[in-house]
Amino acid sequence: MRRTSLSIAAGLAAVLLVSGTPAQAAVSAKDLPKKGDIVKAFPEMVDAEFTSFTTKKNSAPGETCDTSKLVKVKRLTSIRGVSSTSASYVQSTVVEHSSAAKVKAYLKSYKKYAKDCATFTEPTSGGTVTTTLVKAPKLGQSTVMLQQETAVAGVVSYSSTVFIGDGKRVAAVVAIDDAAIPASSINKLAKVAAKKMK
């Protein structure tokens, strides 16, 4: 995988989330796939540099197709890898929300985003972004899967994102590359994320 341009998909990747049920403890690194899980799904990430982070804010669709907004969450923890050539990017995130209703609203916002932003022009690069809501693997209580293509000056980058809602948690897995993301790879990592998020 190679990433040649940073599109709205990168912002979408940062929006990954998961929320926990009242009996659950706060999300932590144990609720995420490990580096080895990511490499099993995406072997090209074997030499990637991985970083982890935790925050109390998450990204969500903004007022326009090319923007996002930060929303408060109880806790977000994430692991991301960037290949040694900076050509591939894979991230897994789990977010804990204060209620299951907030999780449902979050997932619904991405379904709406996919409809409203099926095709748009990214103003800073002039690139054309195409967003598609695709059939998602059946994981958690509900799952949303988006694919994006961003074309800038004849160069196309691709992203695939899976959001998995379960109770007050949402897990998200995103991959960005200059080649189409294999469904088998993103689905394999999404299954691990769904299992770990509980």
Image: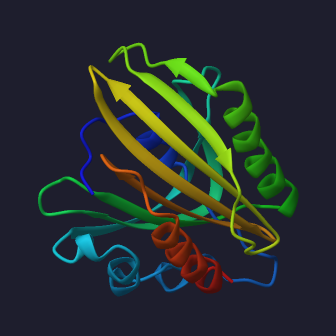
Please count the marks in the image.
0
Where is residue 47 shown, x and y percent of the image?
Answer: 16, 74
Where is residue 10 shown, x and y percent of the image?
Answer: 41, 43
Quarter location, residue 80 = bottom left
Q: Quadrant of the N terminus?
A: bottom left
Where is residue 118 shown, x and y percent of the image?
Answer: 64, 28
Which residue is nearer to you in this view: 146 or 173?
146
Q: Quadrant of the C terminus?
A: bottom right
The answer to whether residue 168 is visible is yes
Drawn side of residue 157 relative to residue 118, left or right: left
Quarter location, residue 90 = bottom left
Identify whether 179 is placed above or below 67: below
Please report the residue visible at 63 percent of the width from the left and 40 percent of the height from the top: 132
Identify whether 85 is placed above or below 112: below
Where is residue 95 shown, x and y percent of the image?
Answer: 61, 64
Please report the residue visible at 64 percent of the width from the left and 60 percent of the height from the top: 163
The answer to whether residue 69 is visible is no
The residue sitting at the left extreme is 85
Colour pattern of the rendering: rainbow
Quarter location, residue 126 = top left
Drawn side of residue 126 relative to residue 108, left or right: left
Identify whether 71 is placed above or below 103: above
